[in-house]
Image (spheres, grey):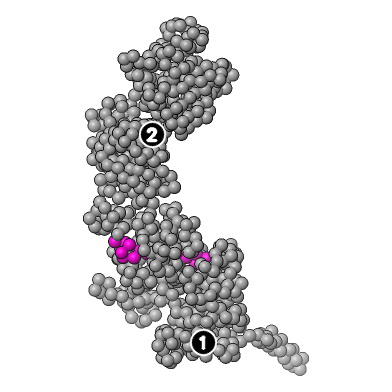
């Protein structure tokens, strides 16, 4: 018995020594604040909020504690005699917003807790204990209980998670984060001009003392009382100067959806069963402005990222609506919803746009913020879920300001808008590239046999003169080639007063002369398109045509034949030799080696040059000679005068070496060298001789091909 009592006493002593409070351990946060002697107002606030027990015992917190001087300033600014004049709800808001989950010293606050570990110098926010929950709200004259969405609803159904309280974040600004992001004190003072940047600021407050360790967390003393910051949705609603911008969101992008999970949770908390509605933003938006979380690609991604929102003032919005968005529509109700999406999303960034990074931080349209931070921004705020900029102008979205916008914003061009969106929109809205766009209306496209079947979600084409209808891919392929012919990768701004040739997006060429335009297909049918109107955009010129630039139906040989048959044609002799060879099919105009859909350039020696080629023994005297050697001479001669897989015109835009259709006996390709200036193009052959393009008789359009007349012939050695 004596031995047993001794052993039991030893065990109790070891247990007590193992689990008793270690000597030198700091007190909990509440007691530490008491001991410091300069947080009596904050402690009174904690008492009134009911958080003494929480902060006086266990837990794991970071607390940004306002000192007594901070509260004295707060009382004076808000006309309050002291904490006793503050209601419990206000006290709770201050205390809970000062509390950050988990304990962080200043060093760790700059780091992001990612799923793959700590990412240094990437964080500037932390989730606080404060959230708002269900609030009463009048909607269309009816009282409702409403809670904000806590997800971005990008899928159309993921807008609320009942287990997420939508806690607000508190922003802080550390030197290590600023250095990592290439920011300076000016970025901080842009928002807080009356607070010096010390290298550790919390919102508009300075940190006076940092890294004070308590048993249940870390205390950072600050010199201002921080009330919970509003989110983007709340701040915009509180400012009359953005009321018209907000009204667009409210009317077209906001829904209030009854939610069973939110209703049940609220009933458990309150003991009263009333429907709870979630304020939901449309899935077409880049994010939900009332969502306190970030993208939620990772649970903590709100530590390192936030939204940015640019809100035009009422006056700026009115001007833009009247001159741009509603130029061809009477009301916003008449606008296609896609246009409203694009307009709103152009002002919404899913990343943080710091003041010094306006130009380099891109939105979903690939544009930076097109504002002068010094003159165009009339209001700037750091909010709980992002940065807010009030602006004296709208973001000139490239989808509207580009050549694409002239089709997009005019209902008469809905078919061309659809076609351009499918194939060329990302390119056409790039305001760093210049374009010429030739627009034709829905009426013209329908006259030409095209339509879009909304029920079947496909293009259809019926030949105007009758014939089988193409549907789906064949119809689209036909239209796509035509649409590409209406786009040039250069700004031709003087089609009205000059003449010339234009390379289009797919490598084909069209020609223009004093407000008339025609393609190879138009040339075949002896028609042209007239320019009805012209408009200038941020990245080029738009011409409105009365007729489609049609695709050709005839082969290159047919076009060459027509040139040769003209009176006194200088193309005649070349065609005579071509037409008598086995590589040419007269019925179809096909030339062996020329593949449909690929680009070529025919360099046709004029009649005199053909005679010179005969004299130099590069051609037989007669095109009808059937001698094997003579036939080979003709075929080789023709092939060396056809540039393979490339089109070149005397516009000064292309030059250098080009392959021809002729191959050497060992299978190697042959080449020609082109020098090119506007109106003057010279071709040098493999023997060192040159021939010039006769410009006034050249630039003849063909099927994916351009035909030029040369004043000499090209020599070759096989």
Q: Secondary structure at mark 2?
A: strand
Question: Residue furthest toward the bottom?
Answer: 2
Q: Tell me the distance, in whole angstroms, between the alpha carbons under discs 1 and 2.
A: 73 Å
Q: Please say whether residue 15 is visible from this viewpoint.
A: no
Q: Quadrant of the N terminus?
A: bottom right
| Crowd around label 1: few <14 · some 14–19 · many ≥20 (10 Å) | some
* Residue depicted at 42% across the width and 48% down the height: 430
The residue closer to the viewer here, 439 or 127, is: 439
The residue closer to the viewer here, 333 or 310, is: 310
* Residue depicted at 38% across the width and 16% down the height: 570
Q: Which mark is residue 69?
A: 1
Q: Quadrant of residue 91?
A: bottom left
In the picture, measured across the screen, residue 399 lies left or right of residue 68, that is left
Q: Quadrant of the C terminus?
A: top right
Q: Read off the magenta span.
A: 302-318
In the picture, measured across the screen, residue 571 lies left or right of residue 59, that is left
Q: Earlier in the sequence, mark 1 or mark 2?
A: 1
In the picture, measured across the screen, residue 475 lies left or right of residue 223, that is left
Q: How many marks?
A: 2
| Crowd around label 2: few <14 · some 14–19 · many ≥20 (10 Å) | many
Q: Which mark is residue 502?
A: 2
Percent coordinates x, y for residue 6 in the rendering: 75, 91
* Residue depicted at 35% across the width and 47% down the height: 537
Percent coordinates x, y for residue 99 in the rendering: 51, 79
Percent coordinates x, y for residue 87 in the rendering: 40, 88
The residue closer to the viewer here, 213 or 532, is: 532
Whether the magenta-drawn stretch holds residue 262 is answered as no
* Residue depicted at 41% across the width and 39% down the height: 489
Q: Secondary structure at mark 1?
A: helix
Percent coordinates x, y for residue 341 in the rendering: 34, 57
């Amino acid at each position: 018995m004596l031995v047993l009592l001794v052993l039991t006493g030893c065990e109790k002593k070891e247990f007590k020594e193992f689990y008793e409070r270690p000597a030198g351990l700091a007190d909990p946060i509440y007691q530490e604040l008491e001991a410091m002697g300069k947080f009596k107002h904050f402690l009174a606030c904690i008492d009134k909020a009911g958080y003494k027990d929480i902060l006086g015992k266990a837990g794991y917190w970071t607390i940004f504690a306002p000192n007594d001087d901070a509260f004295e300033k707060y009382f004076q600014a808000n006309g309050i005699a002291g904490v006793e004049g503050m209601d419990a709800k206000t006290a709770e808001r201050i205390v809970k917003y000062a509390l950050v989950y988990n304990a962080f010293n200043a060093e760790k606050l700059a780091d992001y807790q990612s799923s793959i570990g700590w990412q240094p110098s990437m964080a500037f926010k932390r989730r606080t204990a404060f959230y708002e929950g269900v609030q009463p709200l009048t909607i269309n004259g009816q009282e409702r209980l409403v809670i904000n969405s806590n997800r971005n609803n990008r899928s159309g159904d993921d807008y609320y998670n009942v287990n997420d309280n939508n806690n607000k974040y508190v922003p802080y600004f550390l030197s290590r984060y600023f250095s990592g992001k290439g920011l300076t004190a000016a970025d901080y003072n842009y928002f807080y001009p009356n607070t010096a940047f010390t290298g550790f600021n919390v919102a508009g407050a300075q940190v006076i003392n940092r890294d004070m360790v308590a048993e249940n967390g870390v205390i950072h003393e600050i010199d201002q009382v921080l009330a919970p910051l509003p989110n983007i949705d709340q701040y915009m609603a509180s400012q009359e100067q953005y009321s018209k911008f907000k009204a667009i969101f409210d009317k077209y992008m906001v829904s209030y959806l009854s939610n069973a999970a939110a209703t049940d949770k609220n009933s458990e908390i309150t003991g009263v069963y009333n429907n709870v509605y979630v304020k939901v933003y449309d899935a077409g938006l880049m994010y939900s402005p009332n969502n306190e979380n970030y993208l939620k690609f990772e649970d903590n991604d709100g530590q390192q990222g936030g939204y940015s929102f640019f809100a035009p003032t009422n006056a700026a919005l009115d001007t833009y609506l009247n001159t741009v968005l509603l130029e061809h529509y009477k009301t916003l109700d008449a606008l296609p919803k896609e246009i409203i999406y694009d307009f709103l999303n152009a002002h919404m960034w899913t990343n943080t746009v710091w003041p010094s990074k306006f130009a380099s931080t891109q939105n979903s349209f690939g544009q930076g913020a097109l504002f002068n931070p010094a003159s165009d921004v009339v209001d700037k705020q750091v909010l709980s879920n992002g940065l807010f900029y009030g602006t004296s102008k709208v973001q000139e979205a490239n989808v509207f300001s580009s050549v694409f916008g002239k089709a997009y914003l005019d209902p008469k061009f809905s078919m061309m808008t659809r076609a351009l969106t499918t194939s060329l929109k990302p390119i056409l809205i790039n305001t760093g590239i210049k374009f010429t766009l030739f627009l034709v209306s829905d009426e013209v496209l329908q006259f030409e046999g095209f339509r879009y079947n909304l029920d079947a979600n496909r293009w259809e084409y019926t030949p105007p003169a009758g014939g089988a209808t193409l549907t789906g891919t064949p119809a689209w392929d036909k239209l796509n080639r035509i649409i590409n012919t209406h786009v040039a990768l250069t700004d031709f701004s003087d089609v009205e007063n000059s003449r010339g040739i234009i390379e289009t997006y797919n490598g084909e060429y069209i020609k223009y002369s004093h407000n008339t335009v025609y393609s190879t297909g138009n040339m075949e049918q002896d028609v042209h398109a007239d320019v009805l109107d012209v408009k200038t955009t941020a990245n080029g010129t738009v011409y409105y045509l009365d007729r489609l630039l049609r695709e050709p139906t005839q082969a290159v040989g047919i076009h060459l034949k027509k040139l040769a048959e003209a009176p006194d044609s200088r193309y005649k002799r070349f065609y005579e030799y071509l037409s008598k060879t086995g590589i040419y099919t007269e019925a179809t105009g096909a030339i062996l080696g020329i593949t449909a859909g690929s680009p070529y350039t025919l360099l046709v020696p004029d009649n005199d040059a053909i005679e010179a080629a005969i004299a130099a023994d590069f051609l037989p005297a007669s095109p009808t000679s059937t001698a094997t050697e003579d036939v080979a001479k003709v075929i080789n001669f023709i092939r060396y005068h056809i540039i393979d897989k490339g089109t070149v015109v005397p516009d000064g835009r292309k030059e250098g070496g080009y392959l021809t259709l002729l191959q050497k006996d060992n299978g190697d390709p042959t080449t020609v060298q082109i020098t090119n200036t506007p109106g003057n193009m010279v071709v040098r052959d493999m023997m060192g001789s040159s021939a010039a393009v006769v410009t006034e008789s050249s630039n003849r359009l063909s099927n994916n091909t351009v035909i030029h007349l040369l004043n000499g012939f090209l020599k070759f050695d096989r």
